[in-house]
Amino acid sequence: MASMKVLGIESSCDETGLALYDTERGLLAHAVHTQVAMHEAYGGVVPELASRDHVRRLIPLLEKVLADAGATRGDIDAIAYTAGPGLAGALLVGASFAESLAVALDVPALPVHHLEGHLLSPLLGSEPPAFPFIALLVSGGHTQLMRVSKVGDYELLGESLDDAAGEAFDKTAKLLGLGYPGGPALAKLAETGVAGRSKLPRPMLNSGDLAFSFSGLKTAVLTAVRKHEMSDAEKADLAAEFQEAVTDVLAAKAVAACRQHRLSSLVVAGGVGANRRLRQKLDGALAKIGGRVYYPEVELCTDNGAMIAFCGAQRLMQQALPDRGDGAFAIRPRWPLDELRAQASS
Amino acid sequence: MRLLAFETATRRLSVALWQDGELIERAEDLPNGGSDRLLPWVQQLLAEAGISLKQIDGIAFGAGPGGFTGLRLSCGVSQGLAYGLDIPVVPVATLEALALAAAEPLVWAVLDARMNEVYAAAYAVAGDAVSELMAPICVPPAVAPAPTFSGGTGVGDGFATYGDGLRARKPDLAQVRADVYPTAAAVARLAAPVFARGAGVPAAEAQPIYVRDKVALTTAERLARGGVR
C-alpha cells in the first residue's frame, strides 16, 4: 500500500488536538490547545465552555498542522477523530467537523476510541514496546489495567470502582487549597513533605484482584483536613502520604497484572503517568521482574491528536478501506473499551 | 449559484439545497439531535438535483440563538464542508430565518431558551427581505421587551411554552403561530444575497451566535453567593 496521510482530531474534553500522521514517515506534525487556563476560574471543566472553545480552535490548529507538515488539505487521505468516551458536547464538535470534512474531501472518516489512543501512544515513541503488553491507563477520567494483545485487541483486567486516580489527585488538591487543576500542584507539594507522618489507607491493596478504589482515600484526607487547622508542613506531609498511597496501589496492581499474564512490558498512559513518584516505583518494580516500563513522549501524555491519527492509521493498515457510507455518524460519550475487540473480530 | 443550508437550532432539523432560487429541502422533528441525518440528507439532495458536492458554491447555517448542541452541529458540519471544499460560509441569525419562514409582515420571533428564558427579536418581512427591528436577546418572558409595531404576529415555540406571559407583554398581537420553526430553506434565502455580493466568510470564522453567554459561575461568584468551594 502506498503511504497514506491520516488527520487526527481530538476534542473529548478540555484539549483540542490536531495531527497529521504518515503511515510510512510517522508523525508529521501535531498541535494541541489546552483550555486549562479558561476553566481555572470555575474550579473545573465547564462542558459548555469546553465545547465552545473547540469550535473556535479546530480550523486554526488544522491550518497550523498542515503548514508545519508542509501539506495541504488535498493531501489528507483519511480522517480519524475521537468518537468517545468523553463530554458529549465536546465530542460532537470534533465529530461534526471530521465527518463533514471527510465528505468534502471524499476520504474515509474513522471514529476512534479515546482510550485506545492513549493505550497506543507509546508506540509513537522512538523505542516502541512489542505486543503483547500490560497497559496502565491513569488519568483524570480513567484508572484501568488492560492486556493489549495487538492493535484492536484489548482486555480489561481491572479498573477503578469509583474515582479515577487523577480525579483523586485533583479533589485532594482542592481540599488542601491548591486550586485547579491541582494534581500536579499536589505532586509538587508532596516533594517537600514526608510520607508516613500522617497515615492514609492503601485502598484495595490486598483485594486479590486488579480493581481500584480511590474515593475513600479522598474522604480520609477530608477527615484529616477537618480535624484541625493544618500548618503548611503538615499539608505537605499529608500530600506526600496521599501520593505514596495512590502510587503504592497503582504500582502493586500493575506489577500483579504483569505477573499474572507473564508479561514483562508495561505501558503507562494518561496524565497521571507523568507523576515522578509513580514512575520511580514502576521502573523499580518492573526492573525487579526483568521487565521494562514504556511511557509516551512527554508531550503525548495529555490528550492529543497524534494518538488519534496513529490509531486511525493502524486501522487503515490492518483493514481494507471502509466505504465512505452515507455520512451518518454518532458519538459515544460512554464507550467501554473492550467492546472494540468484539468489533475488531467481527 | 448553488448553496447548501443547515438549520438545527430547534427540534425541527432541516437541510436545504438552493440552486439559483430553486429550493429542495429535507426536514424532520428530532428532539435528540440529528448527527445521523444531516450528511445523509446532503447526499440525498445532491442526488435528487443530479449534482455533486464539488459544484456547491457556499454553505449557510442557522447560527443561533437556539439550542447550543444544535448550533454546534450545524456550525461544525458547515466548517468541515466549507473548509474541505474551500468555499465561503454565511452564518444567518436563526430568529431571522424564523421570521422569514413565518412569511408575515411584522414578526415577534421568540424561541424557548429553557431555564425560564426566551430568545427574542422582531423583524419586518417583505418578500425575501427581512429587516431587524429588535436585535436578538435572551430574557425571561415576563420582562421581554415588546416590539414597538402595533399588531403583528407572535412566532416560534417560545409562544408554546410562555404564550400567556408573552401575550401579556404585548396584548395587541394580532395572532400567534407557535408551530412555525426556522428552516434551512429560509436560511438559504437569507444567505443567497450575501453570497451574491461576495460577503461570505472563511470556514474558520463561521461561529455560532449563542446570545446566552453566561453559562457557569466562577468559583469566586459561587462563594460570593454563599456557595462552598
Image (tube, coloured by chain):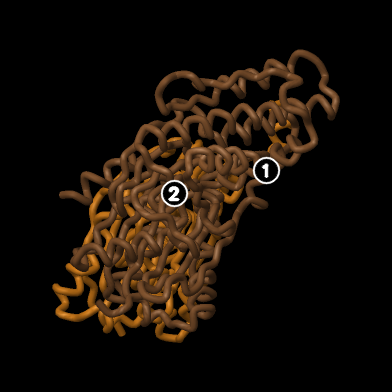
Chain colours: A brown, B orange
Quadrant for the N terminus of chain A in the image = bottom left
Q: Do we see residue B115 in this rendering?
A: yes
Query: Which chain letter goes with mark 2?
Result: A
Dot 2, crowdedness within 10 Å: few (<14), some or many (≥20)? many
Where in the figure is residue A79, as x and y percent of width and height? 35, 67
Badge 2 vs badge 1, beta-carbon distance below 8 Å: no
Residue at horizontal 51 percent and vertical 41 percent from the top? A286
According to the picture, the residue beneath numbered tag 2 turns out to be A89
Secondary-structure class at tag 2: helix
Q: Which mark is residue A184?
A: 1
Question: Which is more toward the observer, B114 or B190?
Answer: B114
The quadrant in which residue B31 appears is: top left
Residue at horizontal 45 percent and vertical 45 percent from the top? A266
Query: Which chain letter goes with mark 1?
Result: A
Secondary-structure class at tag 1: helix
Amino acid type at circle 2 is Gly
Question: Which is more toward the observer, A237 or B9?
Answer: A237
The CA span between labels 2 and 1 is 27 Å
